[in-house]
Amino acid sequence: ETGVTQTPRHLVMGMTNKKSLKCEQHLGHNAMYWYKQSAKKPLELMFVYSLEERVENNSVPSRFSPECPNSSHLFLHLHTLQPEDSALYLCASSQEYQGAVGYGYTFGSGTRLTVV
Amino acid sequence: AQKITQTQPGMFVQEKEAVTLDCTYDTSDPSYGLFWYKQPSSGEMIFLIYQGSYDQQNATEGRYSLNFQKARKSANLVISASQLGDSAMYFCAMRYSGNTPLVFGKGTRLSVIA
């Protein structure tokens, strides 16, 4: 398998459920990201992991909990979500070099989450 | 603050015609990279083309070219010979100073008409 793989593709969960989104990259990249994309809103950066350490958390509610056990895997643990959390959640990876600007992201296909 | 602006929420183009999607950016950093991504209805973000701030020539990738005007801080995407499969959301993004996350614009929805 190549690229960035996200599972599941679709998820419907109740507000009291606990679920996890999974992202796996086979590109040898050293940084991974979670983005949220709501209808008619710009992409929102949620979490950044570089060399398996979280380096940025853009004031995301604690009901979203990321985990990066190694450089190839990234999880987003979800609990007690709200209907407004329904969105497309995108995972991405990239290769980070100090001072380098020419490395873009490779994205997964996303998980469409619906909270009922 | 670093910022990307895409002023066209939606665009229509006739099949086989060329179309330009606008992108302006704001940064005081001399070193930066500009990216365009395509997002079909399936959701995946697909990398299209890259332009570095020090690149002397405009980037081209097949039917995609980037009209880079550094003094105007614009990086417009030109799609030649549009195809029905080009219908999608298009995002302009910028990375500056290395090790910083990509900053994305709000996107432009392109619809190609037969």
Image (cartoon, helix red, strand yellow):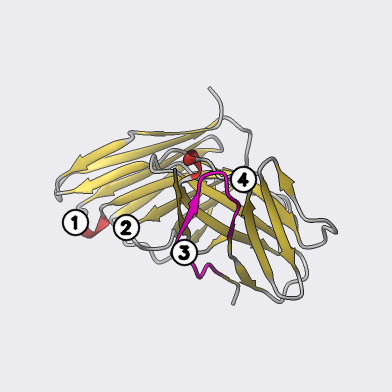
Q: Which residue is mark 3?
A: B106
Give a yes or no on whether discs 1 and 3 share a subunit.
no
Q: Magenta span covers which residues?
A: B5-20
Q: In the rendered structure, which disc, 1 or 2, sits on the residue that comes first in sequence?
A: 2
- Amino acid beneath label 2: Ala
Residue A44 appears left or right of A61: right
CB under 8 Å between discs 4 and 2: no
* Label pair 1/2, CB-CB below 8 angstroms: no
Write down the residue under mark 4.
B48
In the depicted view, which residue is nearer to us: B16 or A45? B16
Q: Are marks 4 and 1 in contact (CB under 8 Å)?
A: no
Q: Residue at x 19, y 56 (%)?
A: A83
Task: Identify the residue under disc 1.
Answer: A83
Q: Secondary structure at mark 1?
A: helix
**What residue is pinned by disc 2?**
A39
Q: Amino acid at mark 4?
A: Leu
Camera-nearest label, 4 or 1:
4
Between B20 and A78, the one nearer to me in the picture: B20
**Is the residue under label 3 in contact with that under label 1 (CB below 8 Å)?**
no
Q: Chain of mark 4?
A: B
Q: Position of residue A1 (x, y in %)?
A: 53, 22
What is the chain identity of the residue bearing mark 1? A
B84 within the magenta span: no
Inspect the image, locate mark 1, and give the three-letter code of the amino acid beneath it. Pro
Looking at numbered disc 3 in the image, what kind of residue is underneath it?
Lys
Among the 4 quarters of the image, the one containing residue A2: top right
Q: Chain of mark 3?
A: B
